[in-house]
Every structure is written in C-alpha cells, then in structure tokens.
Image (spheres, rainbow, N blue to C red):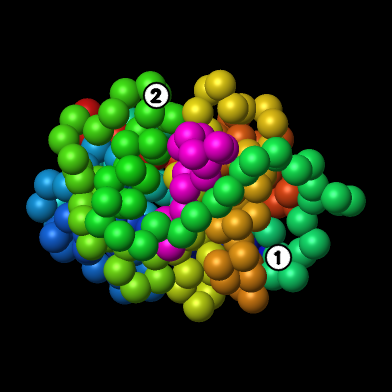
Amino acid sequence: MTADAIALCAHGEAAWHAVGYAALGAAWADDGVLARGFGETPHPFLLGAVTLAPDAAVPGDVPGIVCDSFARLRLPGRRAEPTGFWMIRDAGHPGHPGRPPSVPGLVIRRVETDDDVGWFENLAFLAVDGRPPGRPGELHPPGSQRLPGLTLLTAEIDGEGVGTALSVATGRVNEIGAVAVMPAHRGRGVAGALTEAAIAVEPGVPAVLSATPAGRGVYRRLGFTEVGRPLHHHPV
C-alpha cells in the first residue's frame, strides 16, 4: 500500500510540474516511469524530474533537481537530501474530526481573471517568504487559470488577502499545493480551510501533497496520512 500511495503522490507532483512547465512555455514529458523537463528549468521553484516508479532511470541530461519519489536512487554528480513529506487522504474522507474551526469573515475565491492570477502569485510569494515575485507572472503568468486541471484559490478576510492554495486534478489524484498563509493570520484555521476548499475541487479521488515540516500537523488534523519522504538530488 505504501508504494502505491507514494506512486500516487509522485503522480500528483509530476502533474503540478507539468502545469508549471506548460504555463511557462517549457517542455515536460511523462512516460509513466519518469516525468521530466528538457532544457533549463523555467523557474527555481520547479524540479527537473520526478520519478514515478522505484526503478526509474534518470538520464544525465535531466536539468535541475531530481525528485526521487521512493528515496531509492544514487545519482552520480548529484547531492541527495530529504525534503518534504508525502501525504495522502482517501477520497470521501470526512476531513477534520468534528466541526472544523470557523474563521470569522473568511472568504475563499476561485481565480478567474488574469488580474486574479497576478494577485494570487503576489500573495503566495509574500505568504511564503515575505517577498513579492521578482517580476509579474514569473511562475503563474496570465492565462494560468485556464490550464486544464488547474484551480487557483485565494483567501480574504474583510477584503484583505490572507492566503492561497491550488488544486491540480488529474482523474487519479487531486494534487494540493501552494497552501500559504500570511504570518499575521496563521494559527487561526485559514490553512485548513484553504486545503479543504482545494480538496473540494475534486473530492472523488485521493488528495495528495508534499508537506513542509511546519504543515505536517495541519494536514494530519485534516485526515492526511504520511506515506514517505522523497529525496531531492541537487546538481553539484
């Protein structure tokens, strides 16, 4: 079960990167064993490849960082380090036990226009590390909201942007990502509400994500189970 669950997480991660590469006009291919980019990675937040099977072979010309989903590989010329935590929630899971905490005034909206996309990207970057994008649309350019399978969400309280999340629905999984909350609004249930809203985009398939150490507790409370920890192989 764990290997199958990791495979679903890897599939979701690869799907998110496929969307990111497509948004930036870069090439990405997925043969069911390895999903990878070609040429330089189009943004520092994007990987060069994601392994989809434990015995995947990674060519030497793969750019950037390789996500070794099953933490099995030794790749010459690359330095491996653990990163994130694969987590999964079965379809139909009730989520937070009991009634989830309500957040007064919280409104979660789906991104619909190019202006909304710009606001989503600016808010996501600020929530992650306090800095706006280096240039408008550097990761989510105008039109990203129309990419197949991608749903971008923003959260507001009294008209103030407080957080973001996204969903990439593939038919097999619902990949949850970009769950980020502005520091002044953390610890109030905003991240949980955003995650549930992203899951609700496609609730009929397992929800998968790669959790940060800070986010693991939030996702556990929402019913996610940790199934593994991938390695990132960095070029040296």
Residue 209's spot in the image, x, y percent?
54, 51
Specify whether residue 160 is painted magenta. yes
Query: Measured from the top left, where is residue 79 in percent x and y?
Result: 33, 31
Q: Is residue 111 left or right of residue 24?
A: right
Mark 1: few/some/many CA within 10 Å (<14, 14-19, 20+)? some
**In percent of the image, x 70 and y 51: which residue is there?**
224
Residue at numbered disc 1:
90
Of helix, strand and loop, which one carries label 1? loop
In the rendered structure, which amino acid carries the disc numbered 1?
Asp
Mark number displayed over residue 232: none
Question: Nearer the viewer's eye, disc 1 or disc 2?
Answer: 2
Residue 232: x and y in percent read 39, 39
Secondary element under disc 2, as helix, strand or loop, is helix
Q: Quadrant of residue 8?
A: bottom right
- Residue 100 x/y as whole percent: 79, 47
- Find the magenta span and give its range: 151-164
For the point 74% across and 70% down, the residue is: 92
Instruction: Say whether residue 136 is left or right of residue 222.
Output: left
Which residue is denoted by mark 2 in the rendering?
A: 129
Residue kind at label 2, given as amino acid type: Asp
**Helix, strand or loop: magenta stretch:** strand
Q: Earlier in the sequence, mark 1 or mark 2?
A: 1
Task: State yes or no: discs 1 and 2 in contact (Cβ < 8 Å).
Answer: no
